[in-house]
Image: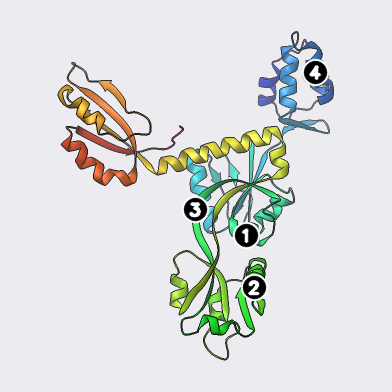
Amino acid sequence: MTEAPYNVKLYLNEFSNTSLTSPSFSLLQISRRCCEKFIVEYSTRSRLLQEVWLFFSIWKIKGDKIFMEKLKILLAKGRIYESVYELLKDVGISINLPDRTYFPTTNQKDLAFQVVKPQIVSNLLANDKADVGFAGKDWVYENGVEDKVEEIMDLGFDGVKIVAAIPDSVDYEKLLKGPVTIATEYQVLSQKWVNDKKIDGTIFRTWGTSEGFVQDNEDSIAQILIDNTSTGSSLKANRLKIVDTLMESSTRMYASKKAMADPEKKKKILELKMLFEAVLDARDRVMLEMNVTRGRFETLVTGLPSMKSPTISPLYGDDGYAIKIAVKKSEVPTLLPKLKELGATDILEYDLRKVLP
């Protein structure tokens, strides 16, 4: 069994859908359990067998076919999709979504994407229908699955607050003395708020454009609105004021418990997290390059901010030094004039794509 005609790892990469009945695949007909046993007993003799076992942890057998199990990723429709699309693109993962379809194609063989409504991403993860998804924290808690999924990271996109609002002209304390109707998309969060505040409230489910249900007149369907807001401009336009904040939310990366229990999937998920962090950190920084003479070198270096320490190279002809530093974009307006004062010349500024500490 150790005399396979090909390196299994390379062979599988090239012929992932070849029938296992092919003579070249006789070694691959060994079950995962047998491979594990052989590795324990003959690990010093059979390097090839170890490679087979490694690939059985990534590739799966179904019938007489061998295939790679892809990481299933859910993308939420709407503004979340646009933000995550740009993040994936900056990482190097391209996706293309043809019109009227929900399954984007990608340049990554080990990833599979599906587009769904943002409200159901966390439910699908909680029920192990996918491995990774991007969703707002608000809908994770609205669906009551915060303990059934794992938050991998806060991407910081699309920050909103879930707020309670009433008409500008209404007295909040007086309003709560009687029964009220609450218009909202967030039934679970609203019911929790009602219970916590001990309000005599009835929840009225809306499906978007909820502001129109709350007015200061007898014909108003509801007296309180619970909705998400980023700037508050829509509330102001409808003459509504915020009286309480239920929670703050943003787009986050979540994973199913099942995926995180799978060593290979967990490894891939954490690799994606690392790449996302590298891109997000780079978006907040720029690289500055400059030259300085020997006479002003120490003064300049002492006044430099940097992630760790600047990169310094001698200039041709022993005429000074070239210096590189990565700085936060917010520091640039005050830093550039300071650098000139300290003796920097030929200053260049350019964006970074990824920053890996």
Q: For label 3, count other residues whose C-alpha is less than 10 Å away and answer few (under 14), some (14-19) or many (20+).
A: some
Amino acid identity at mark 1:
Trp
Determine the CA span between mark 3 and mark 1: 15 Å
Determine the CA span between mark 1 and mark 2: 18 Å
Amino acid identity at mark 2:
Val
Residue 282 shown left or right of residue 318 in the figure: right
User: Which type of secondary structure does the marked residue at label 4 adopt?
Assistant: helix
User: Which type of secondary structure does the marked residue at label 2 adopt?
Assistant: helix
Residue contact between numbered discs 1 and 2, judged by CB atoms under 8 Å: no
Residue under numbered circle 4: 27
Residue 192, above or below 36: below
Position of the C terminus by quadrant: top left
Q: Earlier in the sequence, mark 2 or mark 3?
A: 3
Q: Earlier in the sequence, mark 4 or mark 3?
A: 4
Relative image position of residue 231 (x, y in whole percent):
44, 66
Determine the CA span between mark 4 and mark 2: 64 Å
Instruction: Say whether residue 117 is visible.
Output: no
User: In the figure, residue 284 lies in which quadrant?
Assistant: top left
User: Which type of secondary structure does the marked residue at label 1 adopt?
Assistant: helix
The numbered dot on residue 194 is 2
